Amino acid sequence: MLLPRFSYHQPASVAEALEVLGQHGDQAAIIAGGTDLLVNMKHGKLAPRHLVGLEGIDGLEEIGADNGSLVVGPRLTASALAASGELSGAAQALALGAASLGSPQVRNRATVGGNVCTARPAADMCVPLLVLGAKALLAGPDGPRELPLDEFFLGPGQTAKKPGELLTGLSLPRPAEGSGAGYEKLGLRKALEIALVNVAAAIWLEPDGKTIKQAKVALGAVAPVPMLSPGAEAALTGQTAGEEAFAQAAEAAATDAKPISDHRGSAQYRREVVQVLTRRALGQAWQAALGQ
Ligand SMILES: Cc1cc2nc3c(=O)[nH]c(=O)nc-3n(C[C@H](O)[C@H](O)[C@H](O)COP(=O)(O)OP(=O)(O)OC[C@H]3O[C@@H](n4cnc5c(N)ncnc54)[C@H](O)[C@@H]3O)c2cc1C
């Protein structure tokens, strides 16, 4: 399978990238690692005439700080995020999700920006980003804007990103003391597998080390978009961390999930898996928050 013909552009700044995108409209596509885009082009699903690479733009491949937030650059690869020392506490959720994506070869190319913009319901970096309350930072012809990630995902492969907009970062609250994360993924195979269900959890403990100040659970592959479980959050907030609270939260997460049956598993099976994985992810997050 050959790729269709295209011109390659390598802008040196966000402003230049927006200019190229504006000039070529729907004939242009941004390319990061290419692990989604090039596959779709080879399969004839997409045929952009202009590809806009981001490697000439400084700062898109770093984790920076801004007013008490961490800003994760969209060109950071899954490998880089999995190994990053800057993602501590609850922010480890992103490192754990990144480490579960594809294979080493895919992780070395696949970027967090591409994962978020592709918006698959099971995307390994999107589910963790939801528990962290991440915001998408966008630059476009009408100026910059930011959008909470749970408003960014609209459906499978669909986002609130407008034509001509570029994702310039993902903003996360700075890691807090006494917080930790867990991530669980079940696929039909052990490697190179899109999740049948994936669950991310983050817990923030009160200084007593027992009471849950805040907790979030996000679910993948059980709705048209990666989703937060409000029921799990309500079941955990203010409770004493431990098996009892986690079992109640897991039940609430299974109720919140909206799975459908397909060739990979029934809706009922997916709900049961949500329950098991939520309990495990919360247990991991708790241990991590205790520094164990
Ligand atoms: C063999 C294989 C296994 C895989 N396994 C998994 C898996 O286990 N889990 C998983 O979640 N995914 C998996 N994927 C999918 C893919 O690797 C990920 O979605 C990856 O994160 C996409 O990132 P990328 O940098 O390659 O994106 P690209 O392919 O370069 O781009 C993807 C889309 O995002 C847009 N885009 C990229 N960056 C930006 C930006 N900064 N601003 C605006 N738009 C942008 C592009 O225009 C394109 O539409 C797999 C893919 C392959 C080929």
Image: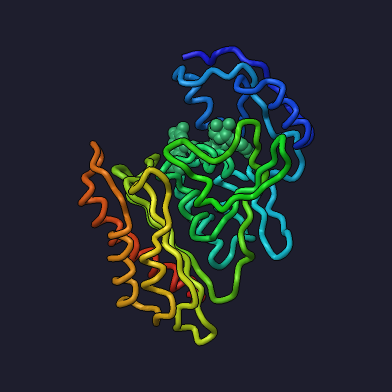
**Based on the displayed image, in which of its 4 quarters is residue 143 positioned?**
top right
How far from the left and from the top, in percent, is residue 250?
31, 65
The reply to whether residue 33 is visible in this rendering is no
Image point (42%, 62%), residue name = 217
Image point (56%, 53%), residue name = 148
Answer left or right for 162 relative to 97.
Answer: right
Total marks drawn? 0
How far from the left and from the top, in percent, is residue 225?
42, 45
Image point (60%, 48%), residue name = 136
Residue furthest toward the front? Answer: 142
Image point (64%, 52%), residue name = 72
Question: How is this picture coloured?
Answer: rainbow
The reply to whether residue 70 is visible in this rendering is yes
**Based on the displayed image, in which of its 4 quarters is residue 263 positioned?**
top left
Q: Is residue 230 above or below residue 6?
A: below
Residue furthest toward the bottom? Answer: 208
Answer left or right for 116 relative to 122.
Answer: right
How far from the left and from the top, in percent, is residue 116?
53, 43
Q: Is residue 200 above or below residue 3?
A: below
**Based on the displayed image, in which of its 4 quarters is residue 20 positioned?**
top right
Answer left or right for 140 relative to 258.
Answer: right
How far from the left and from the top, in percent, is residue 63?
68, 53
